[in-house]
Amino acid sequence: MLRRTFAGDGSDNPGGCGSIEQVMSTNPPPGPGGVGRRIEEAVELIEMELRHAVAYVNDAVVPQMRKESISAMRSMAETLKNLADRVERGSYGSGQPKDPRS
């Protein structure tokens, strides 16, 4: 653990010049196999959280995205149908192709 101290009285004065000193941690060092065990526990917790996140995405996000996508596709299909009807009736422009030379 590192702690920053400042010149002068040693108080935490952000305006002064400081130095960094190493402070002993209050946690005892891990015993034999302690680091490996703590890493395994951390990996297990990460894997558990990842499983929960995947389950949430599969159970909540994917169905909602499907619902919204279907709604958007139906809306777009209706818009395209209306556009095709207007083009077919000739009410979209003059109905005659324009001469690109004019």
Image (cartoon, helix red, strand yellow):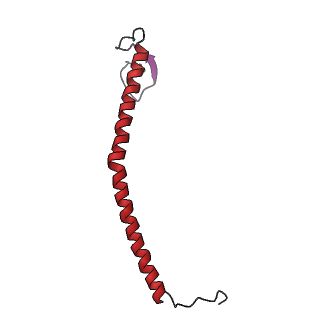
Name the residue at the top extreme. 32
Residue 4 visible here? no
- Dominant SS of magenta comes to loop
Q: Is residue 14 magenta?
A: yes
Observer-nearest residue: 42 or 80? 80
- Residue 94, compared with residue 7, is above or below; it is below
Residue in view at x 45 percent, y 25 percent: 17
Q: Nearer the viewer, residue 95 or 11?
A: 95
| On-image quarter of the C terminus | bottom right
Place of residue 55 in the rendered image (x, y in percent of width and height, measured from the top left): 35, 41
Above or below for 13 versus 51 = above
Q: Where does the magenta region start and end?
A: 12-28
Count of number-bearing discs: 0
Determine which quarter of the picture holds residue 1.
top left
Membership of 21 in magenta stretch: yes
Q: Residue at x 41, y 70 (%)?
A: 76
Q: Is residue 36 visible?
A: yes
Q: Is residue 101 shown left or right of residue 82?
A: right
Q: Is residue 4 above or below residue 100?
A: above
Residue at screen point 39% across, 31% down: 47
Q: Residue 40 falls in which quadrant of the image?
A: top left
Q: Is residue 79 above or below residue 14?
A: below
User: In the image, residue 25 lies at what x, y percent?
Assistant: 37, 14
State the image quarter where residue 81 is shown: bottom left
Q: Residue at x 38, y 26 (%)?
A: 44
